Amino acid sequence: MMRTEGDSWDIVTSVGLTALGVATFRALETIDPEPMIHDDYAAWFVEAAGEPHFTQMLDDPASVGKMRRFGRFMGVRTRFFDEFFAAAWQQGVRQAVILASGLDARAYRLDWPAGTVVFEIDQPRVLEFKDRVLAEHGAVAKADRRVVAVDLRDDWPAALTAAGLDPERPTAWSAEGLLPFLPGSAHDALFERIDALSSPGSSVATDDFGRGLDPQRFADTEEKFFGSNPFGNLDVSDLWYDDARAVPGDWLARQGWSVHSTTPVDLAAGYAQPITDMPAELLDLMQQARYVSAEKRR
Ligand SMILES: C[S@@+](CC[C@H](N)C(=O)[O-])C[C@H]1O[C@@H](n2cnc3c(N)ncnc32)[C@H](O)[C@@H]1O
């Protein structure tokens, strides 16, 4: 476990590097002959960061080999959250919060209805890098994008409301690829704060690896089934906390949210992109993940 209280990072170190990693897999998914998603922004970030492992993967996609298996799961995940936001705006929600946004380009990629405000929360150096690259490419957001540079272990609701979040209006929240990186106290506070800031009509989506995914098992499986570590020299599971925490879906249900939970394999089948070439042991591991969406009706 490499984490310390109040630790920080940029896009090529510690937890920041995981954001670059998932952007790399989104870039690879985008150029796949049968892509699950399109993210034309992801490659910009990988090129700009110049980190050797991920740069090599994009320069020579053939070298990615079995690590593409990991990428397919990233494609499923991206599509799940894309569809979550689309469902929210179809319900009339015009306020979105992307918690731990990393290099998520949804504010640019998705066709948000006019008048939608999209808040992005992440650590300052991650967001500085992201903004610099987007500015260099002249990218134009398709929503009123507001960047909130704050640590999610700190008082992020104060920073978010200062940036203009209106708790009286419904909000669509995402926490994608975030939960294991938070200590249990910050993890549980995250959902308590989302609940407190959510008026009826709000919704939240997250991917919950749960207690079933123990770090050592993940590390062993990476080597065994992806051929090598998708994140290069970084053992992502070293960055995770495995202390006690609430189960997000159960906790939200107890607060009266209407909860739906599914697995990556079921999602992929629903997207007509069934995951077929996975060894059973790997599938079992990835199936520990739950993709949870919940709606606050009252
Ligand atoms: C695996 S990346 C996922 C990024 C993005 N959600 C995506 O799926 O592309 C994890 C992200 O969580 C952010 N993160 C983790 N802990 C955080 C914290 N305490 N405060 C702010 N951001 C945090 C990291 O900076 C990083 O961008």
Image (tube, rainbow, N blue to C red):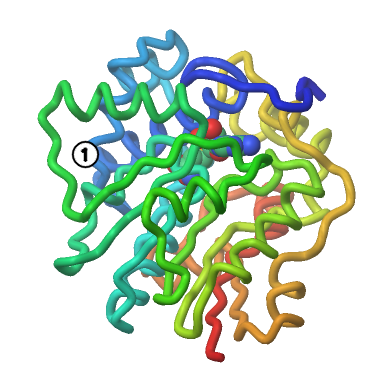
Q: Residue furthest right?
A: 244
Q: Name the residue at 43% across, 57% down.
A: 97
Residue type at numbered disc 1: Asp
Answer left or right for 43 relative to 55. Answer: left
Q: Is residue 28 above or below residue 142?
A: above
| Between 61 and 145, the one nearer to me in the picture | 145
Q: Where is residue 255 in the image (x, y as percent from the top left)?
A: 71, 81
Question: For the residue with label 1, is its CB less than 8 Å from the closest atom of ligand 1?
Answer: no
Q: Where is residue 290 in the image (x, y as percent from the top left)?
A: 65, 64
Q: Name the residue at 47% across, 77% down.
A: 202
| Residue 201 position by quadrant | bottom left
Q: Name the residue at 60% across, 27% down.
A: 15
Q: Mark 1 points at which residue?
A: 40
Tell me the quadrant of ligand 1.
Answer: top right
Whether residue 71 is visible, yes or no, is no
Q: Quadrant of the C terminus?
A: bottom right
Whether residue 259 is visible, yes or no, is yes
Q: Position of residue 180 (x, y in %)?
A: 71, 44
Answer left or right for 154 relative to 25. Answer: right
SS assignment at label 1: loop
Q: Quadrant of the N terminus?
A: top right
| Between 111 and 209, the one nearer to me in the picture | 111
Decide: few, some or many residues near mark 1? Use Cα within 10 Å; few <14, some 14-19, many ≥20: some
Number of numbered discs on residues? 1
Answer left or right for 188 relative to 242. Answer: left
Answer left or right for 206 relative to 51. Answer: right
Q: Position of residue 244 (x, y in %)?
A: 89, 51
Q: Name the residue at 54% across, 54% down.
A: 175
Q: Is residue 47 above or below residue 143?
A: above
